[in-house]
Image (tube, helix red, strand yellow):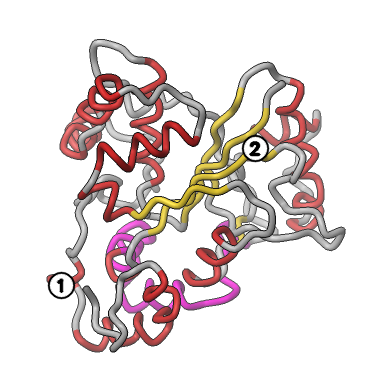
Amino acid sequence: MGAIYWLSSYPKSGNTWFRTFLQNLKQDGDAPVDINELHTGSIASGRGWLDEVLGFDTADMRHDDIDALRPAVYDWSLKTPDLEYHKIHDAYTFLPSGEPLVSSKATRGAVYFVRNPLDVASSFANHLQCSVDQAIGRMAAPEMAFVKSETKLNNQVRQKLLSWSDHVLSWVDAPGLNLEVLRYEDMLGDSLATFTRAARFLELPDDQPRVEKALHFSRFDRLQEQEQAGGFKEKPANTPSFFRQGRSGGWRDELNEEQIARIIADHGTVMRRFNYLDEHNNPF
């Protein structure tokens, strides 16, 4: 019987990089996978997935009504023989019924990717094509969501992100959730151990040669080269590039003192929890 492992993150926190690794690990081929052929399952908010399972068009439905149906869509995975791995940017929220949006029955577990919000800010600004100050404001907004319009049709449905801090806490403190947390910084600095731990958690092959090969095929410079050569279908239309830098600590060159102070004021408690700040609120 199948079930879902969620690959969850606030945007620009390593989710797509991990999905590339996941596809390379599963495929175990002699060449890197095509970044435009990541067959790791639809994003949780994909309207096409919802419409296909429901058997009708959700285009004219209100956001709250669609959300009420989403757990039943994910429950359909229980009818399949294999485990599924789906990206999700929604916060871990609950419906009025008390049921998690992601379905407690269908969810086998989740990997949550967390990244220093000081680094998220510039990458998020690039993704949204807005100023860094605007991105910082959106990261602090408790009502932040993608696809908020009720009138403009999108190939995804609404995703409630909440603030960066609330998004992180919604997943890492979700009651009863089988969870593995990966820091983006550890994915970069201790790749073999971190990705091996994730593969083992996801019930995938975790032998060292296979993980090393998947990591080699998923190097950030390879992803950038593929995007430059053939584009990336998941890139927002007006964004110059999806795979921008793929490093940690870039905030030191990209943020001014006021911006750094704003982010720490907004998210200091959660940043300390994940070792991004010392006890005096100084960034590591």
Magenta highlight on residue 189: no
- Quarter assignment of residue 255: bottom left
Q: Amino acid at mark 1?
A: Arg
Please give the name of the residue rendered at 47% of the width and 69% of the height, measured from the top-left corner.
164
Q: Position of residue 121 (x, y in %)?
A: 32, 68
Residue 38: x percent and y percent? Answer: 42, 27
**80 versus 136 height, above or below:** above
Please give left or right for residue 168 compared with residue 80 in the image: left
Q: Image height check: is 103 above or below 274?
A: above
How many neighbours does mark 1 have within 10 angstroms: few (below 14), some (14-19), or many (20 or more)? few
Q: Is residue 150 left or right of residue 110?
A: right
Please identify, in this view, whether the residue under mark 2 or under mark 1 is nearer the observer: 2
Vertical position of residue 38 compared to residue 71: above or below: above
**Residue numbers of the magenta segment:** 120-148
Q: Quadrant of the N terminus?
A: top right
Amino acid carrying label 2: it is Arg
Marker disc for residue 79: none
State the separation of the CA atoms marked 2 and 1: 38 Å
| Residue topped by disc 2 | 108
Q: Sequence order check: which comes first, mark 2 or mark 1? A: 2
Tag of residue 252: 1
